[in-house]
């Protein structure tokens, strides 16, 4: 047995301590995606009229499970696991032991928080959806659970910062490896934006649900939530971008197009994803038109780093293709490894991000939002962004990372299954998201159980789209099962590798340009972010604090 | 930093940034000069005193002119008051809505009436109904177990 372990160890790219840490995070995220998928399927089939739920299970309870598990728990655990893997690989091969202790503390806090919140949702004491809008008042343990998840994730960030700081001290004057830089940027964004939701939960929701205070300022709680809620979507997207920028070039046999531009895009994301939360609140009272419009302007700026990313991806593909002998304007396209599941899944995610991003521009467009706000269009939108672009890239990450992590090979069979899984996922999302967009324009509200609105004529136009959405839910559930099968097979059952399996991390295409040192001066960027945030938020938030009346809690489910 | 950008990327970004600027100018012009702003208003009201505070102590439809109405509405768990409204074609309707309990929405499919109703605040929006028909007034913000039955009817004759 001892001998066996020793032999295994030699085959792993990762230090056993890191390996355990990364697998613990990604493994827990699999529980979340499984629970989220079951709830997603059931609520999807209920709201489209395919099934009726037993009286003991509420539609909104299932919707809360689906949102919390998918949007908050699956993403956070998976992202942190992935970031640890790249940070360990690029900053000297393993995490410093101090960082590892912090990381484990964060992990257990997040697990404890998830368990608490899940119990509260399952006992129907927290059917408040993942946005937990006051004055809906859940049981205090739900909010305490959420707070633990946030605090735990802060520790995860500190672990990454510690590993990065140690490397910087040992390599003075050197630009940090791109992956580590981007991981730090992602966690900087996360730390700044979660302050909002932490203030909401700790100073408003917890004391209020415990009965220590009778009333809270509802508009303030919504504003704090959306200060967090929009950068949250970039916290999901940035790790996908890291994979595209750093891992994909290696997988396609090319080089990282530039060492500086990706860093600049991430800095722009930190600056412009935070002072923009009002574009989720365009339809509500208590915030004047001037401040709403100002944040709409800032929101549009965040399109620029995504345009830069699109350019870099195409440039990387073209460089790789031409190196392999491609000719003509688009010849490089045929040299891309579409038969490699690691690439195919990520590429599908990139393509879907084109309509998904365009949809986002529509949603943030001030008056235009009146047509789509709180309709199924919005649900369709974020199923293209987070549930397609981000999720597909996370599947690609799993396929790329697991051989190095578990010492097992991607067999041709598993690769083929991965391709099919991607196809099923894209089909499922097409069946679900396209009809959601259309029926949203026809006026079907989001977050609403099956209803005919007393057989109102307007509902009749919705019916065929509901059927398609239901079919999409079924396909996507099969997709999750297939993904979990592939992941668990690669974890426990696939044949062992003969030699060290590399975690594909790209090299930089040498242009002679070194990244400008200013990009690594985090103090500057954090200060600029805070200034922008203060400009965008101080006056309207002071107005809300001084003028908005407070509300008592209501349990209406 | 700009010298790190290859020429084609500069062109690509100029096109992108240019479109964003055009886009924002259009949105801003519509907002400032045409007055097309999303709903919302700065008036407040204590949620627990909605039933005792004018004008919400008497929700209903008030005729202001030949084709102009004010709808004073209370959105509560799980109904709108007034729940049925009939107006002539071409009417301009000024909605003022508030909630005594949780957050609701007032959404009328096939129109631009899309209003968040936050307790403590009075939301206002004006819309002209040009087309005849049976419209549905729906709550489009999750408000509790009866959210999906929270509706009203608006008939334009």
Image: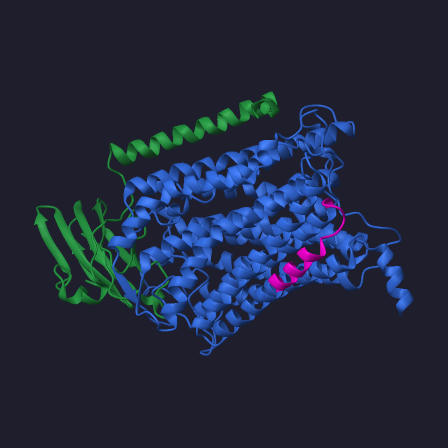
Chain colours: A blue, B green
Main secondary-structure element of the magenta-colored stretch: helix
Q: Position of residue A377 (x, y in %)?
A: 43, 50
Describe residue A444's horizontal placement relative to residue A382 as left or right: left
Q: Which residues are magenta?
A: A90-107
Describe residue A404's horizontal placement relative to residue A462 as left or right: right
Residue A283 appears in the figure: no
In the displayed structure, B80 sits above or below A409; it is: below
In the displayed structure, B116 sits above or below A57; it is: above
Q: Position of residue A478 (x, y in %)?
A: 63, 61
Describe residue A365's horizontal placement relative to residue A479 as left or right: left
* Residue, far bottom: A56
A342 or A74: nearer the eye? A74
* Quarter of the image where the N terminus of chain A is located: bottom right
Q: Is residue A116 magenta?
A: no
Residue B91 appears in the figure: yes
A136 or A162: nearer the eye? A162
- Image quadrant where residue A307 sits: top right
Q: Position of residue A499 (x, y in %)?
A: 88, 51
Residue depicted at 56% across the width and 64% down the height: A36
- Image quadrant where residue A306 sits: top right
* Quarter of the image where the C terminus of chain A is located: bottom left
Q: Position of residue A113 (x, y in %)?
A: 54, 67
State the count of labels: 0
Describe residue A359's horizontal placement relative to residue A218 as left or right: right
């Amino acid at each position: 047995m001892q001998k066996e372990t020793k032999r295994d160890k030699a085959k792993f790219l990762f230090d056993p301590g890191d390996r355990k840490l990364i697998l613990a995070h990604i493994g827990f995220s699999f529980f979340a995606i499984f629970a989220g998928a079951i709830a997603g399927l059931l609520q999807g089939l209920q709201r489209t009229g395919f099934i009726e739920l037993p009286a003991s299970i509420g539609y909104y309870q299932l919707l809360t499970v689906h949102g919390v598990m998918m949007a908050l728990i699956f993403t956070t655990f998976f992202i942190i696991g992935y970031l640890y893997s790249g940070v360990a690989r690029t900053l000297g091969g393993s995490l410093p032991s101090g960082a590892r202790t912090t990381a484990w503390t964060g992990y257990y806090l997040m697990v404890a928080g998830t368990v608490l919140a899940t119990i509260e949702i399952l006992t129907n004491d927290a059917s408040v959806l993942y946005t937990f809008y006051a004055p809906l008042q859940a049981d205090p343990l739900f909010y305490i659970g959420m707070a633990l998840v946030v605090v735990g994730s802060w520790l995860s960030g500190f672990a990454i910062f510690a590993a990065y700081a140690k490397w910087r001290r040992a390599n003075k004057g050197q630009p940090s490896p791109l992956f580590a830089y981007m991981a730090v940027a992602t966690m900087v964004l996360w730390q700044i934006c979660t302050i909002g939701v932490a203030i909401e939960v700790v100073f408003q929701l917890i004391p209020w649900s415990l009965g220590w205070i009778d009333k809270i300022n509802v508009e303030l709680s919504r504003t704090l939530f959306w200060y967090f809620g929009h950068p949250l979507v970039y916290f999901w997207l940035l790790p996908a971008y890291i994979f595209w920028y750093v891992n994909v070039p290696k997988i396609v046999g090319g080089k990282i197009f530039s060492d500086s531009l990706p860093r600049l895009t991430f800095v722009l994301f930190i600056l412009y994803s935070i002072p923009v939360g009002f574009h989720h609140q365009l339809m509500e009272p208590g915030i004047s038109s001037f401040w709403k419009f100002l944040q709409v302007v800032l929101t549009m700026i965040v399109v620029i780093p995504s345009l830069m990313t699109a350019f870099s991806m195409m440039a990387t593909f073209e460089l790789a293709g031409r190196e392999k002998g491609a000719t003509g304007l688009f010849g490089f396209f045929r040299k891309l490894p579409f038969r490699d599941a690691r690439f195919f899944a990520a590429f599908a995610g990139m393509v879907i991000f084109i309509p998904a991003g365009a949809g986002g521009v529509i949603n943030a467009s001030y008056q235009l939002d009146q047509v789509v706000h709180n309709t199924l269009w919005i649900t369709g939108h974020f199923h293209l962004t987070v549930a397609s672009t981000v999720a597909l890239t996370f599947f690609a990450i799993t396929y790329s990372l697991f051989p190095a992590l578990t010492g097992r090979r991607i067999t041709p069979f598993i690769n083929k299954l991965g391709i099919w899984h991607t196809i099923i996922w894209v089909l499922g999302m097409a069946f679900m998201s396209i009809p959601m967009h259309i029926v949203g324009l026809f006026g079907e509200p989001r977050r609403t159980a099956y209803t005919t609105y007393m057989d109102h004529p307007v509902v009749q136009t919705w019916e065929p789209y509901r059927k398609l959405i239901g079919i999409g839910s079924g396909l996507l559930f099969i997709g999750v099962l297939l993904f979990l099968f592939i992941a668990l097979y690669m974890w426990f059952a696939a044949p062992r590798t003969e030699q060290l399996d590399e975690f594909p991390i790209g090299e930089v295409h040498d242009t002679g340009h070194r990244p400008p040192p200013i990009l690594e001066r985090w103090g500057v960027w954090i200060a600029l972010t805070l200034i922008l945030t203060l400009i965008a938020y101080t006056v309207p938030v002071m107005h809300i604090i001084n003028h908005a009346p407070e509300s008592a809690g209501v349990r209406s489910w | 930093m700009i010298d790190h950008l290859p020429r084609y990327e500069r062109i690509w970004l100029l096109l992108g940034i240019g479109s964003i600027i055009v886009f924002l100018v259009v949105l801003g012009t519509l907002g400032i000069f045409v007055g097309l702003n999303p709903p919302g208003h700065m008036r407040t009201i204590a949620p627990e005193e909605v039933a005792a505070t004018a004008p919400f102590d008497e929700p209903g439809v008030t005729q202001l002119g030949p084709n102009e109405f004010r709808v004073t509405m209370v959105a509560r768990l799980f109904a709108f008051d007034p729940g049925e409204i009939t107006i002539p074609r071409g009417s301009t309707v000024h909605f003022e809505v508030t909630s005594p309990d949780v957050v609701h929405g007032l959404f009328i499919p096939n129109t631009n009436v899309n209003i968040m109703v936050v307790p403590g605040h009075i939301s206002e929006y004006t819309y002209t109904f040009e087309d005849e028909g049976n419209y549905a007034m729906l709550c489009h913000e999750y408000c509790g177990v009866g959210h999906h039955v929270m509706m009203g009817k608006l008939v334009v004759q």
